Amino acid sequence: MELTDRKKQILKVVVESYINTAEPVGSKAIVEKLSAKVSSATIRNELADLEELGYLEKPHTSAGRIPSPKGYRLYVNELMEKHALSPSETEKINASMQGKMAGLDQVISKAGQMVSTFVDYPTFAAANHKEKTSVKRFELIPVDDVSFIAVVMLTDSRVKSQLLSLQLPVEKEELPQIAHLLNTHFVGIDAPEMNSRLMNLSDQVSGHWFLLVSRVVEYAGELVQEAGRQEIYTSGASQLLKFPEYRDIDKAQELMSFMVDNREDLPLPQSDAPMQILIGPENVNEALKDSSVVVASYDIGDNMRGLIGVVGPTRMDYATVAARLSYFAENLTRMFGKKQLPLKEEKENE
């Protein structure tokens, strides 16, 4: 059944009133906010219809109504007005982005922390590889008679290096040839394929060379596998305690613990949509069934995209959260595009 304009207006009033007050909304409050003159009796009838259609719910202890997940969904899809950021909001967001951040992991982690401070909800942040990460290039740098530095450039633009030592002498004149062998056989593939190719080479290269190549391939394989494991950062979980929905400390603790201890189960949409909103039961995980999640994506470059999610009660101020999150994500995309967030070389020494 398609809703009439009046039913939609009433639903919009109920949603926005409930977002602001956390109190069930009655017919009298709706009459005061509707522009057209409508009697309380008519409003009560419309509320009953909206409840029967599943857009509203009626708490047992109140004569007023609250939105259902279905009601929130219609509101977000059709009725929500776009929130225009005020100068003070944009100034606060811009100021938060002025600090220099070197290293992709630090950028992602800090982004979540920043968003939590200006949306006043818990957040999570992660990066998605649009394509699987692999090795782009190897370089070997001599150090002494038994040591060398393996430099591994990954397809996600990270550069890793590690000091490797062998029991046997390392001839520095051989390193360019071994690097060429590595770049010929071990770039652009996943870790299992790297191991398979290594075994195939065992009969084709000398034992000394094979030992050296094995050490580098082992290190590179670990980097590729690590890149495939998505790191998720959470911030501001304690913000939940200020919402009436989480006055029950057990309920609050359950969601806070989920965000900290089960962060890998937080929703990370695979779609390239710049903004996605998941309301209540639309979140697959049981821990989020009474919560909503707003997720924005931004372009990191090099076949990667960043994700920032905001978690809160279904009574979330969707318009404001979406506007602030969208502005922040768009700025991050521009900053990465202009390479204003340099990725530093990460070194690991044994």
Image (cartoon, helix red, strand yellow):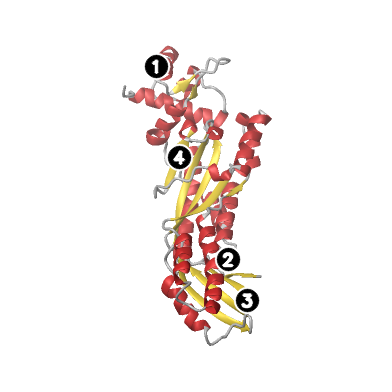
Lower sequence index among marks 2 and 1 = 1
Label for residue 277?
A: 4
The single residue placed furthest to the bottom in the displayed view is: 173
Q: Amino acid at mark 3?
A: Leu
**Which residue corresponds to the image point at 47% horizontal and 77% vertical from the top-left?**
205
Q: From where the camera sits, is residue 235 visible?
A: yes
Residue at disc 1, secondary structure: helix
Residue at disc 2, secondary structure: loop
Residue 184 in the image: above or below residue 130:
below
Q: Which class describes the residues within 10 Å of circle 1: few (<14), some (14-19), or many (20+)? A: some
The quarter of the rendered structure image containing the N terminus is top left
Residue at disc 3, secondary structure: loop
The quarter of the rendered structure image containing the C terminus is bottom right
Lower sequence index among marks 4 and 3 = 3
Label for residue 166?
A: 3
Tags 4 and 2 touching, CB below 8 Å = no
Lower sequence index among marks 3 and 1 = 1
Q: Position of residue 196 (x, y in %)?
A: 45, 64
Q: From where the camera sits, is residue 85 visible?
A: no
> Which of label 2 and label 3 is nearer to you?
3
> Which of label 3 and label 1 is nearer to you?
3
Which residue is identified by label 1?
49
Which residue is identified by label 2?
102
C-alpha span from label 3 to label 1: 78 Å
